[in-house]
Image (cartoon, helix red, strand yellow):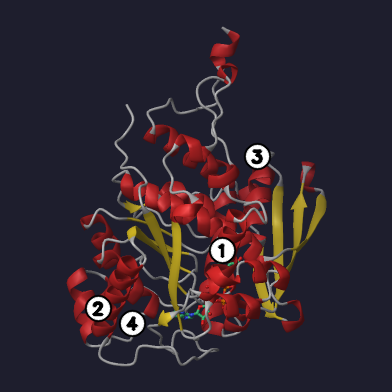
Amino acid sequence: MSIKIAPAKGKLGILTPGIGAVATTFMAGVEAVKKGLGEPVGSLTQLGTVRLGKRTDNRVPKIKDFVPLAGLNQLVFGGWDIFEDNAYEAAANARVLQPELLRKVKPNLQKIKPMKAVFDKNYVKRIDGPNVKTKGSLRDKAEELMVDMQTFKKSNGCDRLVMIWCGSTESFHKPAKVHQTLESFEKGLAKNDPDIAPSQVYAYAALMSGVPFANGAPNLTHDIPALLGLARDRSLPVCGKDFKTGQTYMKTLLAPGLKARMLGCNGWFSTNILGNRDGEVLEDPGSFKTKEETKLSVLDQILQPNLYPELYKDLYHAVRINYYPPRGDEKEGWDNIDIFGWLGYPMQIKIDFLCRDSILAAPLVLDLVLFLDLAHRAGMKGVQEWLSFYFKAPMTAPGLYPEHDIFIQLMKLKNTLRWMRGEDLITHLGLEYYD
Ligand SMILES: NC(=O)c1ccc[n+]([C@@H]2O[C@H](COP(=O)([O-])OP(=O)(O)OC[C@H]3O[C@@H](n4cnc5c(N)ncnc54)[C@H](O)[C@@H]3O)[C@@H](O)[C@H]2O)c1
């Protein structure tokens, strides 16, 4: 039996706190695809398929034809930033996309003017900007954000909204008392509790306004009991954290392969240089610590040293990120991996990934907003674990360890789509082909 999914009618407004490299590459990219100037490479919702039934059935529809997703022509963009640049200016500054391409989508991007941000320099130390809300308590600012959303929705004639955090990485902080219940959180907002980060004010405002929320950065944000409870109470789907793009994506491809063959690993040294604003923000030790935590968690969960001590108990795993302006968004990530095989004989793997950070992240933003909107229309609420595929530090139910293996994540995602449409789940057992 399939579940009831409301149709994807009308316009879907995508709101991004943060209109920087990732957000503008996403927005400009969607406009470029709509004009036939490029293909949505990297996007599962646009290019991916899902196999249905038996391998002999030949039923392999495109995902976008299988589940009712909003179409690209139905998307409208908006957001907040501490800088006043419109999305065209911000995209030009980010220097990800060619000026020639940007010029072709300039009229669409120029219209996207950042609303005034909720910002606190204690959480993002390396940057500061003038386009911020200054009056009142955090509670007043949350209410201003709610008004921003309503105004945006009305003036753009949107049927629904989705919010996705594309803002800078905030300083590392742990769940505190104020994060435990909605009541304590709201009291904290009223008295400007320093444990409430700006991203949490946006998440609160989104959920209070009935808007699903995703987090593309590693910040704590809505991964706290107060906001997860709010999401469930309001029947809203949420997901996070931290887009799985460059080096961590490579890790989650390679590490399951090593474990699958029972090959050992005693060292994994990852280092990066990048020169965009994200790199600048990550120079701050507090912001780097937030990133480091999510980047480090992946290998432990995949390799499971507790189950395979002879292979992974001595694994030394380090991650470094260095800000190196000449490279801009064109990050280079090196991995040196010390592995061992039969009788402990050592071998090495070297990866040198010359990637483009925002080119890898933009399709993930697109997929996430379309899938979150789908989940919302399908009545799914709380943490959407089937969207783990997109994250470095997937959110899970309390007490459940996250699944990091990208192939398990993909299977889970596609099985969730099959489940939504009442199709058989695929187990890959396949004995029936040999009966
Ligand atoms: N590009 C990738 O591959 C990738 C991968 C994983 C995670 N991320 C995360 O995505 C986020 C965006 O990355 P980016 O490269 O676009 O960075 P960016 O610096 O280009 O853009 C972030 C923008 O957020 C704005 N901002 C900061 N605090 C804000 C606030 N409180 N409200 C509104 N705006 C605020 C900044 O002014 C900036 O314009 C970062 O947190 C980054 O760590 C990026």
Which residue sits at x=51%, y=74%?
A: 290
**Residue 187 sits above or below residue 353 on the image:** below
Which residue sits at x=35%, y=88%?
A: 133
Mark 4, residue position: 195
**Could you say which is closer to the camera, residue 116 or residue 273?**
116
Marks 4 and 3: which is nearer the front?
4
Which amino acid does the dot numbered 2 rest on?
A: Glu
Marks 2 and 4: which is nearer the front?
2
**Could you say which is closer to the camera, residue 407 or residue 34?**
34
Q: Quadrant of residue 101?
A: bottom right
Which amino acid does the dot numbered 4 rest on?
A: Asp
**Could you say which is closer to the camera, residue 60 or residue 426?**
60
Between the residue at mark 2 and the residue at mark 3, the CA separation in whole angstroms equals 50 Å
Marks 2 and 3: which is nearer the front?
2
The numbered mark, 4 or 3, whose residue comes first in the sequence reads: 4
**Location of residue 301 in the rendering, given as x and y in whole percent from the top left corner:** 53, 53
Q: Which mark is residue 143?
A: 2
Between the residue at mark 2 and the residue at mark 4, the CA separation in whole angstroms equals 19 Å
Mark 1, residue position: 26
**Ligand 1 has an atom within 8 Å of the beta carbon of the residue at disc 1:** no
Mark 3, residue position: 260
Q: Secondary structure at mark 2?
A: helix
**Residue 429 sits above or below residue 256 on the image:** above
Q: Secondary structure at mark 1?
A: helix
Asked whether disc 4 touches disc 3, contact meaning CB atoms under 8 Å apart, the reply is no
Between the residue at mark 3 and the residue at mark 1, the CA separation in whole angstroms equals 35 Å
Which amino acid does the dot numbered 3 rest on?
A: Ala
Between the residue at mark 4 and the residue at mark 3, the CA separation in whole angstroms equals 42 Å
Judged left or right of residue 16, residue 99 is right
